[in-house]
Image: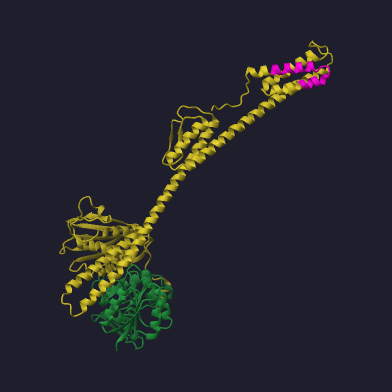
Amino acid sequence: MTELVLVIEDEVAMRRFLSAALSSHGFKVIEAGTVAHAMTLATETHPAAILLDLGLPDGDGLDLLRKLREWSTTPVIVLSARDREDDKVQALDAGADDYLTKPFGVSELLARIRVALRHARAQTVTADPVLAIGPIRVDQARHEVTVDDALVHLTPIEFRLLSFLARHAGKVLTHRQLLHEVWGPRSTQHTQYLRVHMAALRKKLETDPARPRWLTTEPGVGYRLRDE
Amino acid sequence: MSRSLPSHRTGPRGYLFAVAVVCAATLGGLAAAQHASLADEAMLYSLAILIAAHAGRGPGLVAAALSVIAFDFVFVEPRFTLAVADTRFLFTFLVMFAVGAAIGTLTVRLRAAEAASRQRERDTAMLLAFTRDAAAAPDVEGVKAAVLQHLREGLDLEPHAVDVPASGPIEVNLGRLTIGAEQRALVEAVTGQATTAIEKLRLAATAREAELRATTEELRNSLLSAVSHDLRTPLAVITGMATTLRETAEVTSHEGLDTIVAESERLSRILQNLLTVTKVEAGAKPRREWVPIEEVVGTALMQLDGALTGRKVEVVIADDAIVHIDPVLGELLLVNLLDNAAKHTAPSTPIDLTARRDGTGAIIEVADRGPGIPEGSERAVFERFFRAAPASGTGVGLGLAVCRGIVVAHGGTIEALRRDGGGTVFRCTFPDGEPMPTFDEPPAMAAEAAR
């Protein structure tokens, strides 16, 4: 089944590229250049995924996202410029599933879409208690983590952090989302704890913590457990 | 104009005038003697004293004395002697004399007050005119000219010089000229006004300059962000299209497309530098957080993945050091330092990144084994658009300027040092912007975590 992707982008050339890239990889693409048009298409066509440029001319992409989230769980991937970290964080906290920083290559684009589609489908399937990401295996039932079959000892917080990341493997998670999940709703400001525990996790899971292969940092936004 | 204060001395003319007036009164009295009583004659003398007293107190008193004598001699019985038959006339004499003295004194006072008020009026007018001229003066020289002009015209003073110091009150150099207290007060008022006028001129100049700078800065920033936005979209399209083409089977040479992608990425980094240097120099505050240095290094290395291909980068971070830094700017700093090292050194040479903490902050160093910075250029390398040598290959010379901008925005320092055994060390210091937090879990968080 070919899946439908809604591209919301005001630049014609950018739409043409996204359209060409997605079509050649088996997606069906519909395009919108304005917020109003996008809203109509989203309600009428029920796309499998949405690519949303945050800088639309006739309205805030963020508003569109919030409106969309009132009735739809369709994965949304936000397109944004490098120095717009705040926009990205806001979009992610408002329900976007991921983001792409311009300029990006086609492989990055496809990887993000695949992850988003997989997560959207996984919501309806019973989750496997054992998550495997590359050499890392997280057994949520037995509270055990192995890397290349070697048992790694994690503190309770590190385990919660890793499980949350593993459940959303491939997807970016904001500082706020991570803090909220691991430390509770009252701790969403204490980013420095998160950073220190992430550093500890890297030491235990990565071969070279200064060049993380799996636990990557999205500067100014959050973290991502890569999934390739 | 000579400045004459009302004098208590009266010239001989006043006294002559007094004598003449008394004579006239006597003649008038004689002429009217048939029809007038003695009291009338006394009144006539009173009038004479009144008129004479206008010439001053002295003439008034003289007129009073002469009137008494003339009245006694000419009119009082026995006439034409100084003897007095009726002693009541002695009282009349006394009153006449007293009237003369009193009127004389009053007149003198009145005239003095009148003269003083006229002088005050002139002084006020002078000060007013000066203030107007000084306020209208377009520059410091104009104010100086107004001071000279008004001191000359208003006070008849010819100052040697008017000194205008860079700050503080201006000074009028009068040389050895001695002036009275009143004149001194006026000169002080003038210099006070002049100082205020000059301060106002200087403030206005500063404000104008600041406004001009702000406008220029604003224009530059909006131009830059507009340009970079307009460049970004085509760049994103080029990168995207090139990567799409690279994936399709028809293209046999991937090398060309790889170059397009790599160059687009480089262009995008230059754009990012341009935007950051503008933002940081416009005074945007970095958003500092406590970050493990390893994390910043990790993101920088990931960003430079392509540009550092094949390079050996040795990372040594002492004791899991943390730094108080804006993570996004920190990444850009390291990207630029590493990129700079990679660009200016042979591909076979290693790049070393070391980081540690001292008591007050973090120190991050990027060291290479390149040719080193030319002697005397250690500071210039951080200037915008500086390039070690025109032939030294790629780059617009923005990278290190961005580094300096970022470090300075954090209150830190950056320097290029000669490395032992050849090469260059770029050393950045990041002083802590706030006391380092403890990384023990707060009780609330620990409790939540133990759920």
Furthest-top residue in this view = B81
- The colour one sees for chain A in the rendered image is green
Q: Which residues are magenta?
A: B18-44
Q: Residue at x 43, y 42 (%)?
A: B139
Residue A104 at x, y percent in the picture: 28, 73
Q: Is residue B403 left or right of residue B134?
A: left
Q: Nearer the viewer, residue A17 or A60?
A: A17
- Residue A4 drawn above or below residue B313: below
Residue B66 at x, y percent in the picture: 73, 16
- Residue B219 drawn above or below residue B239: above
Q: Is residue B325 visible?
A: no
- Residue B64 drawn above or below residue B200: above
Q: Quadrant of residue B373?
A: bottom left
Q: Residue at x 42, y 50 (%)?
A: B208
Q: Is residue A192 left or right of residue A208?
A: right
Q: Is residue B194 magenta?
A: no
Residue A27 at x, y percent in the picture: 29, 84
Residue A169 at x, y percent in the picture: 31, 80
Q: Is residue B441 visible?
A: yes
- Residue A114 drawn above or below residue B352: below
- The colour one sees for chain B in the rendered image is yellow
Q: Is residue A160 left or right of residue B132?
A: left
Q: Quadrant of the C terminus of chain B?
A: bottom left
Q: Nearer the viewer, residue A155 or B299?
A: B299
Q: Nearer the viewer, residue B414 or A58?
A: A58
Q: Is residue B31 magenta?
A: yes
